[in-house]
Amino acid sequence: MKHFIFIVLLCLISCSKQVSDNIENIGGICGVVTDFATGEPIKNANVQLRPSGETTLTGTEGYYEFKNINEGNYSITVSKLEYTDLIDDFVITVVPNKIIRRDVQIKKEPTVLHIIDNEGKELSVLDFGDEVTSKQFVIFNSGAVSISCKVFVSCEWIVSASEINNEIMSGEVWPIIVTIDRSKLKAGDNTTYIHVLSNNGSKELKVTAIGEYIEPEVITLPVTTSYNGENTPWNDTFNAEVIKIGNPEYSKRGFCFSSVNKTPTINDNCVEVNGNGLGKFKYTYREFPPQTITYYVRAWVMYGLNNKVIYGNTETFTYNDV
């Protein structure tokens, strides 16, 4: 019996020594996973220890840790949705009773968002030219996972751009129809941008259109005469109406008149009338010489960078100071 107890004690001592040896050989690995471009910590990244195959997830600060690792050489791999898998070849040598730190950075996958035309070619400019009012471009997802997209437009002459109602699956395309209001284009070249944003990249699409040059149009209406009372002159009021504001819109308007030139210009007698837009305008003139005489009057509007003057028809009236 004593011999049996002695043998058991020897076994316990031997096992105790083996456990002690294992504890002395235990170490660990820890580190932080960050974004290669921004340096921000990445949470919920999957970190795998090689060759053991043990895995863990990073916390909110990008921190990971493997505990209770036997002495030896290890390496790690890191994976995260929307990021390129990292196979880290750096050899981490674990030694007893030490936590070895290994920080790594991972890169986002290349942009999977593409803007293409109907033939599948990359598209950078959507050109409406001088006549078209509706055109289409296509969003293509070349990635392995679905993406969520939004189309943003901030331009008064783009009146609509179709929406994306759901995620675009891997390998799928989504057509976007863009409609413009040509009446809101300024004369000449017009340029704006459409922004397509997604959870895996963004794109900017240039949009161009040529606005038509339209001359404003004004007509001269008959002059009206009113009598203010005895021993006072008659009042002669010039009248006109703008029936087309033009593109670019006219900037000035008024009347010109002459008793000699039957098609008066602003180089003759000229008055300017405040205001803009469509509609009628008038001006009462009281500085005619005291004699009976016939006058010719025309309305005018001025527009464009070169201050081009457009005239209306000619109206005649006879001034009488009696």
Image (tube, rainbow, N blue to C red):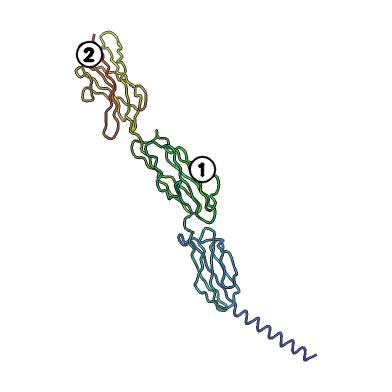
Rendered residue at 62%/79% (across/down): 23
How packed mark 2 is, by other alpha carbons closer than 10 Å (few <14, some 14-19, many 20 or more), is few
For residue 138, which numbered disc appears in the image? none
How packed mark 1 is, by other alpha carbons closer than 10 Å (few <14, some 14-19, many 20 or more), is some
Amino acid carrying mark 2 in the image: Thr
Rendered residue at 51%/70% (across/down): 102
Amino acid carrying mark 1 in the image: Glu
> Does 72 sit left or right of 114 as displayed?
right
Which quadrant of the rendered structure holds the N terminus? bottom right
For residue 163, which numbered disc appears in the image? 1
Which quadrant of the rendered structure holds the C terminus? top left
Q: Nearer the viewer, residue 158 or 143?
A: 143
> Does 318 sit left or right of 159 as displayed?
left
Q: Against 157, is 115 above or below?
A: below
Residue 22 percent location from the top left of the image: 62, 80
Q: Residue furthest right?
A: 1
Q: Label 1 near label 2: C-beta < 8 Å?
A: no
Q: Which residue is disc 2 drawn over?
A: 294
Q: Against 44, is 51 above or below?
A: below
Residue 200 percent location from the top left of the image: 49, 54
